[in-house]
Amino acid sequence: MNSRDPRSTTAINNLPNEVLLRIISETIAYALEPHEWLPCTPHHYQTRAVIKGVCRKWHHLMDSSPELWTSFTIGDLWGDQTKANVIMPSRGLLEIWQARSRDWPINIHLYSGPFAVQPDDSILMMTTLLPSTHRWSRLDLAFDERTAEAFLDLDHLGFGLKDIRASSFCCAKMNDQLLRAFGQCPNLERLVWIFAVGLPMTDQPTFHNALHLFPWERLCHISLEVSWTSTEFCSFFRSSTSAQSIQLNMQQHPADSSGIDLHPIITLPKLRYLGIESASSIYYYVGCLNLPGIQYLAIIPKMVPLQDSSGWGAPPAAVANPLFQDFLERTMLSAQAMIIHGYPFSNLNAIRLFSNECLLRIPVLEIEVGESTAVAVIEYFELSGLLTGHHIEHQGPFMGWCYDSLRCCAVRDIFSSFYFNYHVWIH
């Protein structure tokens, strides 16, 4: 667009201001998922300057629209960390943008780690934005030790934060301190934390000294990458009484020696979405859960186990456990979509599962039972004629069906952090 030619903007400037604002907003922002656990919409600062130079109307519209100045990004998100590729606004510009956002909630994307070009700039950004901490709504953070220390020095009780998405390159002790700091944010509703296990990963279970100090009961949405024993697992779920959505990328910590059957049943009536990507231990961990309102459930084995880089060795093979089968029977009473991979079903247990009338009412289902077991189950029902009017799809080790394509797509959206495909053999 040529800003010197008045005719170049005439048509678009005839649009109502609210429509033009929407167009500008879409222009200066781009949807990006730097990591599947951290979807965000960073803004192009350079694009804002270009748009202001188009014409007087656009210049005025930009300056007078606080919603266009509510996102602050520093550091490259997760890719090339060369100097030319790093977003590094000056302190003066940050102060201007902070003022232009007026009383609007602001979102901060701060990426600093051992890969950062100038880690001191991330600390500068935090201190520059201190006057608006009460308006901080969402905070995306990639921490190194120095940035974490600077963050811990802030007064978190005054934060307006509702959403924190973090990735840390810190020791377990520092992560414990960060968790306690996050817990001081009075309005926090969502916490996403990738690589919360700390370094070294074998040091102690994730948040070992801070798990009980965090107000999990206040959070509605939780996504964590952790290393836990059954004790931490049960303590977390026992405290997450308000959670509507929980996703865990989880590894069993080597210190785990307790039996899950020693823990009483934990009931979470508000939980609607549960996704767990874990090693074999999870099939008995979840046996203590009672989720009467669950709608979407996905339990799958880890594709890239944490122990690959920690020296823990290969995880043990999954072992059949009646507690897990009882958990499935409780869950299918309300579930609308169920994806279960990696559990070692026997022929008898698989037949029992697919004979359950409640399972047959779930619109979206995929269960990995093993190739020979799948054949045995299909043969059983064909000979018995017990599934008249209900068709079970199967291919290789998978069995299931899809009667609701919208719910099927919703599973992928809800559990977007997981490295798995489902129903590709059906659709």
Image (cartoon, grey):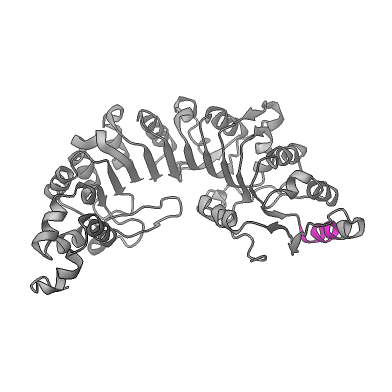
| Residue 33 higher or lower than 294, as above or below | below
* Residue at (42, 55) in percent of width and height: 35
* Residue at (45, 42) in percent of width and height: 196
Tell whether 318 sits left or right of 119: right
Coordinates of residue 78 in the picture (x, y in percent): 36, 57
Q: Which quarter of the rendered picture does the N terminus lie within? A: bottom left
Q: Which quarter of the rendered picture does the C terminus lie within? A: bottom right
* Residue at (82, 48) in percent of width and height: 355
Count how many numbered circles sit on residues in the image: 0
Coordinates of residue 258 in the picture (x, y in percent): 67, 30
Tell whether 141 sits left or right of 287: left
Tell whether 61 sits left or right of 381: left
Image quadrant assignment for residue 281: top right
Query: Principal SS element in the magenta part?
Result: helix
Answer whether residue 319 is visible to the viewer in this image: no
Q: Is residue 135 magenta?
A: no
Nearer-the-camera pick, 217 or 69: 69
| Residue 334 higher or lower than 56, as above or below | above
Coordinates of residue 384 in the picture (x, y in percent): 91, 55
Nearer-the-camera pick, 5 or 29: 5
Answer whether residue 117 is visible to the viewer in this image: yes
Coordinates of residue 186 in the picture (x, y in percent): 35, 28
What residue span does the magenta drawing correspond to? 370-378
